[in-house]
Image: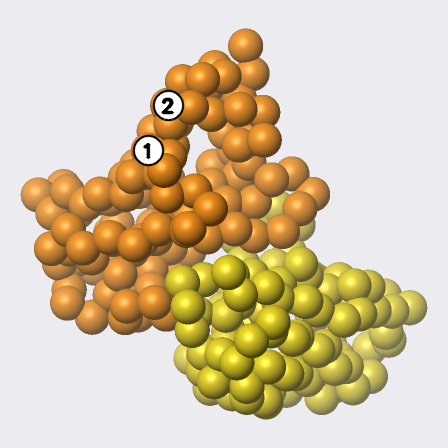
Chain colours: A yellow, B orange
Amino acid sequence: DIQMTQSPSTLSASVGDRVTVTCRASENINVWLAWYQQKPGKAPKALIYKASSLESGVPSRFSGSGSGTEFTLTITSLQPDDFATYYCQQYNSYSTFGPGTKVEIK
Amino acid sequence: QLQLQESGPGLVKPSETLSLTCTVSGGSITSGRYYWGWVRQPPGKGLEWLGSVYYNGITYYSQSLKSRVTVSGDTSKNQFSLKLSYVTAADTAVYYCARCPGFGGHFDNWGPGTLVTVSS
């Protein structure tokens, strides 16, 4: 099975900050990676697919990059609505999610 | 607008089979563009994909759970279902159904989730 790791596990930031979350795969997954945002008590919401494609309706302050085994999710100017937990998911071979990164208010 | 809604018992006894149904509205599960899947999340923990189904019955499952998981579709009701056998307390989780645009893809639409507790 492909294992996914994320760093950091928790990130403290302020409104307006540029935020970067890293996701690493245990083997090459090409560009088959998605990012999700989840708020407490809610279902995950897809943000990015195929490493860098923005889901319809997702603000352009979210962007994704990477290929192979290392990927990043960037939020260019953190907004109050962005405080949440972010998960990556590989779908190159079956499907595996990362453990999550919680973005909290500094 | 596509909506997915999970339904089923909120409490299941250990060693029994967990059964959930996802009802799809605003779209058809027979659309050849999509697979339909199940993801779960134990309380306070991360996400785990369980399995997915295509409208014609093609399925694929998590390798770690494939001996206990069955996912199937009912095109007449526009629903798909999850069965997880021989459950233990470790299977206590919020279970989500979700749409997947293509074989082995990401999940672009999710149901709100339903909590299933395994306890005697």
**Chain of the residue on which disc 1 is drawn:** B
Residue extending furthest toward the right: A106
Q: Report whether B47 appears left or right of B16.
A: right
Please name the amino acid that badge 1 sits on.
Answer: Lys
On screen, residue B59 above or below B92: below
Q: Quadrant of residue B21?
A: top left
| First along the sequence among labels 1 and 2 | 2
Circles 1 and 2: CB atoms closer than 8 Å: yes
- Residue extending farthest to the left is B76
Residue B8, horizontal then vertical, whole percent: 36, 28
Give above or below for B21 relative to A50.
Answer: above
Q: Is residue B38 left or right of residue B90?
A: left
The answer to whether residue A106 is left or right of residue A94 is right
Q: Give percent across and percent down for residue A91.
A: 44, 70
Q: Secondary structure at mark 2?
A: loop
- The amino acid pointed to by label 2 is Thr
**Residue under numbered circle 2:** B17
Horizontal and vertical percent position of residue B94: 53, 39
- The residue beneath circle 1 is B83
